[in-house]
Image (cartoon, rainbow, N blue to C red):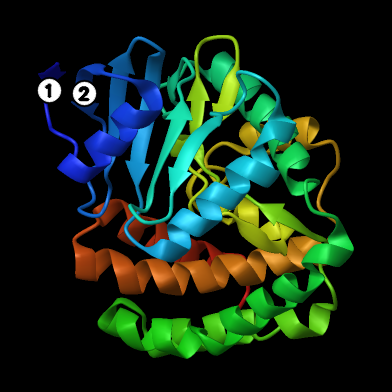
Amino acid sequence: MTESASLPASTAAWVASVLGPLQAVRDTSHVRTNSQVWEVTGRTGRHFVKVSPEPVFHTRETRAYREAVPRLGYANALALKDSSAQLLALIVTAVDGEPLTSGTAPARRRVAHEQAGGLLRLLHQALPNHAAQAEATSTVEATVTGLERRIAAAGDHLSGAEADMLRRIVHTLPGLGPLPAGFLHGDFWERNMLWNGRRCALIDYERSTPGPLVADFVKLATAVWPDHPELRTAMFAGYGRPLSDIEQRALVAFTAADAAGALSYGPRHGDSHVTARGRRAVERLAREGRR
């Protein structure tokens, strides 16, 4: 077996018991320190092995692969081969493609976003609205109650006036009433959209959970749509419906909370991309008169 970065011994033994002897192992983890993903190749072909950093992420991702992801159809998502709660590990099939980036050709990027919108709609519908409403309400409550902690952690990266603006926006959430709910992807942005030139596939479900559907659009709304409104149009063309007026207002509120979170997380972890996302969101909210 060739190795560029070995699997932990216990994980390797489990993977071999499921897939048979491995011929090659390649580390495909993200740059962040808690990412552990390997591409493995053997007699049964190519698979990916993922070890979650915490039990909650493993539980969420396993549930997503068992209950929701199969709705997306063959080749539009990875399929679960096996899962080990003891090792916090899972084995999934491989699909062709590379993550979308700003460098993807504009026409292809639009098609990919439209396809991703259709896949997201299928994922959202994996859990009916009534079955996800309690979690959606909890998400709203947690967003509001957690805001002060995020603002405090952001420190000097938020001015007093900016912090007050975010408070006013986020505190509108409870008054909007029940939001459409379902099964969320939880980390829906271009890094988790694989494009092979013809077809989009969604990956990475460790943050999947029932909740308000509009929450899945926050990262695109803060990091992509301001510069590329055509991708928002493509996304909702694929999704099959626009956001309702209430969801539009909720998206602004979730965006404000996300901005505070980005400015608390990014500087502390040296993540310039997250920090820039939070700063741009705050400045855009101020320009739009959200003060």
Locate residue 263, reporting x and y percent: 35, 70
Q: Is residue 145 above or below residue 223?
A: below
Q: Amino acid at mark 2?
A: Val
Q: Is residue 104 above or below residue 48?
A: above
Q: Which residue is located at x 31 percent, y 37 percent?
A: 14
Quadrant the C terminus occupies: bottom right
Residue 80 in percent (x, y) is at 53, 34
Q: Which residue is mark 1?
A: 3
Of 9 and 226, nearer the camera is 9
Count how many numbered circles sit on residues in the image. Answer: 2
The residue indicated by pointer 2 is 25
Residue name at image x 81 percent, y 52 percent: 243
Asked if the residues shown at circle 2 and circle 1 are in contact, with their CB atoms under 8 angstroms apart, the answer is yes
Name which residue lies at 73% across and 71% down: 136
Within 10 Å of the Cα at label 1, are there few (<14), some (14-19), or many (20+) other Cα atoms? few
To which quarter of the image does residue 241 belong?
Answer: top right
Q: Residue at x 55, y 22 (%)?
A: 109
Dividing the picture into quadrants, the one containing residue 111 is top right
Horizontal arrangement in the rendering, residue 162 relative to residue 14 (left or right): right
- Seen from the viewer's position, the closer of residues 282 and 73 is 73
Asked whether, in this view, residue 202 is left or right of residue 159, the answer is: right
**Mark number displayed over residue 131:** none
Name the element at disc 1: strand
Q: Is residue 111 left or right of residue 131?
A: left
Query: Badge 2 local density, few (<14 within 10 Å), some, or many (20+)?
Result: many
Q: As displayed, is residue 234 above or below residue 209?
A: above
Taking the image as drawn, is residue 187 in sight?
A: no
Note whether residue 78 is visible. yes
Compared with 13, 153 (above or below) is below
